[in-house]
Image: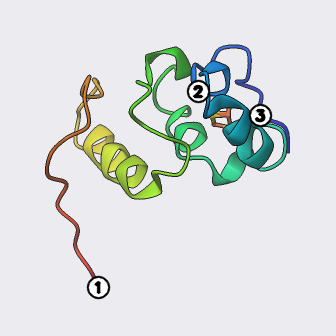
Amino acid sequence: MRCPYMERCQSPKEQGTGPVYQRRFCLQDCTGCARFRLAGSWPVEEIPLWLRPTMMVHADWLLEQWHKGARKIPASMPKMIPLVLV
Ligand code: SF4
C-alpha cells in the first residue's frame, strides 16, 4: 500500500536515504514503517527525522509513552530505551 503521508513526511524527501525508504516503504509497504505507525498518534510533520522507517522498537516505545500521556517526541534519539523481553 502506498503511504498517504508521502507529501507531508520528511523522510522520503531526505537526500541519500529518502529514495531507499521510498522504494522499501512509502511506495509499497507503508504498514511496515515505524513513522507510519506513529502517524496515527502524532502529525507526521512532527515526527523527527531521527526516527527512521526501520525503527519499530523505538516507535513501539514512543507509542507506549503516548498512551502514558506523553505528547511530544524527543528532538533527538533517546540514549536509553528500556527493552523488556518476554
Ligand atoms: S517514511 Fe513512512 S510515514 Fe513517511 S511517507 Fe514513507 S511510509 Fe509514509
Which label was assigned to residue 11? 2
Callout 3 amino acid: Cys
- Contact between marks 1 and 2 (CB within 8 A): the answer is no
Q: Quadrant of the C terminus?
A: bottom left
Quarter of the rendered image showing ligand 1: top right
Please tell me which residue is depicted at 42% across the width and 37% down the height of the picture: 51
Mark 2 Cα-neighbour bin, 10 Å: few <14, some 14–19, many ≥20: many
User: In the rendering, at what x and y percent does residue 79 appear?
Assistant: 15, 45
Color encoding of the figure:
rainbow
Mark 1 vs mark 2: which is more N-terminal?
2
Label 3, secondary structure: give it: loop
* Residue at disc 3, CB closer than 8 Å to ligand 1: yes
- Tag in front: 1 or 2: 2
* Residue at disc 2, CB closer than 8 Å to ligand 1: yes
User: In the rendering, at what x and y percent does residue 3 appear?
Assistant: 77, 34
Which is nearer the eye, 5 or 27? 27
Q: Quadrant of the N terminus?
A: top right
Which label was assigned to residue 86? 1
Q: Is residue 79 left or right of residue 46?
A: left
Callout 2 amino acid: Ser
* Residue at disc 1, CB closer than 8 Å to ligand 1: no
Q: CA distance from mark 3 to mark 1?
A: 32 Å
Please tell me which residue is depicted at 61% across the width and 22% down the height of the picture: 15
Q: CA distance from mark 3 to mark 2?
A: 12 Å
Q: Is residue 86 above or below residue 78?
A: below
In this view, which residue lies farthest toward the bottom?
A: 86
Q: Which residue is mark 3?
A: 3
Callout 1 amino acid: Val
Label 2, secondary structure: give it: helix
